[in-house]
Amino acid sequence: MRALVCETLGPINSHSVKEIDDPTPGKGQVALRVKACGVNFADTLIVQGLYQEKPETPFVPGAEVAGEVLALGEGVKGVEIGQRVIALVSTGGFAEIALANAATLIPLPEGIAFTDAAAFTIAYGTSHVALETRAQLKSGETLMINGASGGVGLTAVEIGKQMGATVIGLASTEAKRELVRSRGADHVFDVADPELRDKVKALGGADVGYDVIGGDAFNTMLRCMKFEGRLLTVGYASGDIPKVPANLLLVKNISVVGVYWGSYARHNPGVMMGSLMKLMGWLKEGKLNPHVSDIVPLDQATKGLEALATRKSVGKVVIQP
């Protein structure tokens, strides 16, 4: 099969697609014919050796797979050859065939495109757990999102509206801001606007902040929070990890809350799976609409990674073998 192989950790464009042996499913595993695989910011870091988790080389990156069951490993029951599924894999997604734990497969209903399904799990899962479990967002509260035009940020806009919040979206260009408006945000501002703090305060401030960018905007968001506000730190696409001035937390009883969705698979998988089942229900009901901005063939996988790493993409990037 063909796969993007990371033989040595290094720059994104140093990795290439190669022919390697087809993987064989072990006990409790299935082999999937990959129809699409979502690209996530973590993937851009993993191949460079900059992520908190470092797979042993050589490895195939990619964690968010949509495809069809190709083969069953020992002891697998309740799964059929040819079944359409979504799967989370630790590695192996940027390939024609991937292995997945059969116990974590999510059936994919007919009528939902594989490309949409590959854009679904991690981005929507992150935002839902962040807003419902970590921030405990309530209907009627105000949610402010930095990086609102990105693959994860757009899902926070959708889920925030689904949960009954007033949504403020922050984005860096007019094209990105127009996309955020089109996805249902109530108010949209330039993240670099020197009057941003005053504009958000004029709306009453934010109960919950959602930040995937980091950098200077994080501290601006901190100053926009209401009494007992909850500011979620979800990622650092800017490359700048902010330092929190603790005195601001004290004055308004603000909480800064970390969100690492992947750790729920190890520490509390019930939260993750319960969230995904609720999201799948919303997807089937048409309440969620994944925004896939780029579909990239496997041979150009590194271009998809670079588009995300340089923040040139809006919405979700998907690799299609």
Image (cartoon, helix red, strand yellow):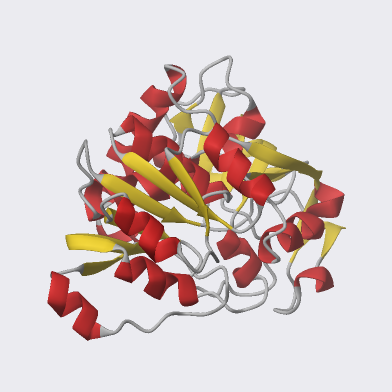
The reply, left or right, for residue 19 in relation to residue 213 is right
Residue situated in front as seen by the camera: 46 or 83: 46
Reply above or below: 308 against 285.
Answer: below
* Horizontal side, residue 273 vs residue 92: left or right: left
Q: Residue at x 51, y 66 (%)?
A: 213
Q: How many marks?
A: 0
Residue 206, picture quadrant: bottom left
Say which residue appears at 41% left-offset and 28% top-offset: 280
Which x, y percent locates residue 140? 22, 37
Quadrant placement of the C terminus: top right
Above or below 312: residue 285: above
Q: Residue 117: x percent and y percent?
A: 57, 33
- Residue 285 as seen in the image, left or right of residue 46: left
Q: Quadrant of residue 218?
A: bottom left
Residue drawn at point x = 70 percent, y = 71 percent: 58
Name the one closer to the observer, 64 or 167. Answer: 167
Nearest the viewer among 315 and 93 is 315
